[in-house]
């Protein structure tokens, strides 16, 4: 099952196809790749570079803003913990004052009841 030798007539056909193949593709506009690649427009290339640089700067700004937001969040968390601590201190102080006032009121009422019962 080897390849059969190519005869003279087949060689003529191959040469004919090689000579006319590109012309046939050009006629039908189905040439897959241009023969001479178009040169890249320098203005377009410069504009693409400027756009990329602008996008990079915007990305850097967004990163910087995210860092600022993170710092603000940390500050708010710290303030919230301080406020919670202060409220718990105030709550303890008010509880002590309430107990003091209750004890004072109880002593006054007890004294008043004792005085009333004596008479």
Image (cartoon, grey):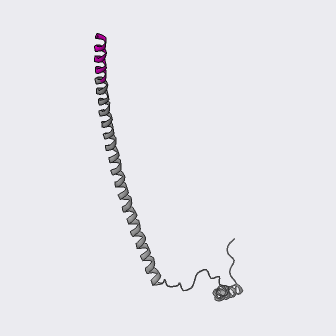
Q: Would residue 5 appear left or right of 83 to someone viewing this image?
A: right
Q: Would residue 99 appear left or right of 62 to someone viewing this image?
A: left
Residue 119 at what x, y percent from top left? 29, 10
Image point (37%, 55%), residue name: 70
The part of the chain drawn in magenta is 105-119
Image point (32%, 30%), residue name: 95
Chief SS of the magenta region: helix
Residue 59 at what x, y percent from top left? 41, 66
Residue 17 at what x, y percent from top left? 67, 86
Residue 86 at what x, y percent from top left? 31, 40
**Residue furthest right as drawn:** 9
Image point (58%, 81%), residue name: 33
Which quadrant, please, contains the N terminus?
A: bottom right
Relative depth, front residue between 42 and 92: 92
Does 46 sit above or below residue 118? below
Q: Quadrant of residue 83?
A: top left
Please count the marks in the image.
0
Relative depth, front residue between 28 and 40: 40
**Magenta run includes residue 115:** yes
Q: Quadrant of residue 81?
A: top left
**Residue furthest front as drawn:** 119
Relative depth, front residue between 22 and 40: 40
Q: Would residue 27 appear left or right of 42 to someone viewing this image?
A: right
Image point (28%, 14%), residue name: 115
**Magenta run includes residue 94:** no
Relative depth, front residue between 17 and 91: 91
């Amino acid at each position: 099952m080897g390849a059969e030798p190519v005869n003279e007539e087949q060689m003529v056909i191959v040469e004919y196809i090689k000579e006319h193949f590109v012309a046939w593709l050009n006629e039908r506009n189905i040439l897959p790749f241009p023969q001479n690649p178009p040169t890249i427009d320098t203005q377009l290339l410069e504009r693409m570079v400027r756009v990329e640089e602008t996008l990079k700067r915007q990305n850097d700004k967004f990163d910087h803003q995210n860092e600022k937001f993170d710092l603000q969040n940390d500050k708010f968390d710290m303030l919230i913990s301080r406020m919670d601590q202060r409220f718990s201190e105030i709550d303890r102080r008010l509880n002590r004052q309430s107990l003091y006032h209750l004890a004072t009121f109880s002593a006054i009422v007890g004294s008043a009841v004792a005085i009333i019962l004596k008479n």
